Amino acid sequence: MKQQSLTPFKMKGKNGLTKKRILSHLIYNGPDSLASLSREMALSVPTVTKLVGELLTDGYLIDCGKQETNGGRRPNIYGIRPDSGYFVGVDIKRDGVHIAMLDFTGEMVMDMKQPSLVDHGSDAGIDALCQQIDSFIEMASVERSKVLSIGICVGSRVRANTGEAFSVFTSIDGSLRDILHEKLGIPVLIDNDSRSMAFGEYMSGVVEKQRHVLFVNINWGLGLGVIIDGQLYYGRSGFAGEFGHMSMFDNEVICRCGKKGCLETEVSGSALYRRFMEQLQNGSSSILAAEIQKGTKIGLQDIVDAAKNGDILSIELIESIGAQLGKHLSGMINLFNPELVILGGALADAGDYLLLPVQSSVKKFALNIASADTQIAMRHSNSSMNATVTHNYENIALLNLNLRFIYCFSVNFN
Ligand SMILES: [Zn+2]
């Protein structure tokens, strides 16, 4: 079949909905035959044949050839066409910008991490970000018209339905999404990191059949993605899940939200970093001490890596944060009665050093009846991805899968 760009769907009514179900089935289950699709969709074979034919013509599907069977007639199978469309995800973090591209089947085409060239506070920063995205698409050697959407993932507060972001490019008035769409000429979606990761896990991560899921994002800050009965929960204005800014301590630590005593001031990557530095100054020893004395700047990942290398100070601080996290997570478990709690974010890379104290605290503090059916899983240890990939890579991949789903089921099918 010749190369072509996707014909945008203008599908309303029954056929549109059925095509959406066929694509959804193939995204989740991989290529399938007409007979099997007809059984799955509870539709006649002629109807499925007609709709699959139209999806083939429109460039959404590809004929994958004959299915392998144990004898008998081998049916043709049909799957999602990889090169019919591409998605770009942009993860804006405090220490850099990570851009990745996926094809229509969800395979990574290219990814690139750049040190933070973007000035998050200025209008010039927006132009610099657009230039980074433009040159990335150029390098990927993919026709620009085939890039169907660009997803921007930022930390902290985002009003997803209007596209306003409140932690980056704060000098602009109005919707960051609309400004980027206009500058790039490609539809843009924007959401916060915890929700993007929660939904990514739900679509293709550790979530199996669970419908009630909490995703705890323990990065520099502390975020929460809430999925209730299979749907992301946004609240009235899009600010649901601000777990890290619950007032929990009588300390004098000013949170980045401007208040003091927030959970995040003691339970987060920034808290780990602060406490690690304080302890070193107070004379504690660590395998990182010599490097720091030489003037080397260390990051969160260095402390997590030190813990994995047996550094007692790093291990003890991560354990103490895990115990505190478990205690406050118990409240969330009492509130939501989730089937699954996923620990993700940079600190999740610490594995059992974080997970075990969390589990122990949840056992101690959550109502037994509320937590009895709650499983706590680590994003990192359950990752099907190559174990050498960094957390950021996972984050961006999840975001992209999220995008692919949103594109198929919201943007393109309205
Ligand atoms: Zn706060």
Image (cartoon, rainbow, N blue to C red):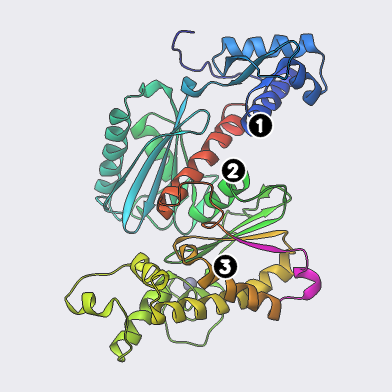
Note whether residue 262 is visible.
no
Inspect the image, locate mark 1, and give the three-letter code of the amino acid beneath it: Asn
Number of other residues with Cα within 10 Å of mark 3, as a class: few under 14, some 14 to 19, many 20 or more? many
Residue 21 vertical position relative to residue 67 in the rendered view, above or below: below
- Kindly identify the residue that appears in the image at 66 percent across and 31 percent down: 29
Mark 1 close to ligand 1, CB under 8 Å: no
Number of other residues with Cα within 10 Å of mark 2, as a class: few under 14, some 14 to 19, many 20 or more? some
Number of other residues with Cα within 10 Å of mark 1, as a class: few under 14, some 14 to 19, many 20 or more? few
Q: In which quarter of the image is residue 77?
A: top right
Inspect the image, locate mark 2, and give the three-letter code of the amino acid beneath it: Ser
State which quarter of the image contains the C terminus: top right
Coordinates of residue 132 in the picture (x, y in percent):
28, 40
Q: Quadrant of residue 342?
A: bottom right
Q: Distance between the residues labelled 1 and 3?
A: 34 Å
Q: Distance between the residues labelled 2 and 3?
A: 24 Å
Mark closer to the observer (2, 3): 2
Inspect the image, locate mark 3, and give the three-letter code of the amino acid beneath it: Phe
Q: Which range of residues does the magenta coloring cover?
A: 366-377
Q: Mark 3 points at which residue?
A: 243
Q: Which of marks 2 and 3 is nearer the N terminus?
A: 2
Q: Earlier in the sequence, mark 2 or mark 1?
A: 1
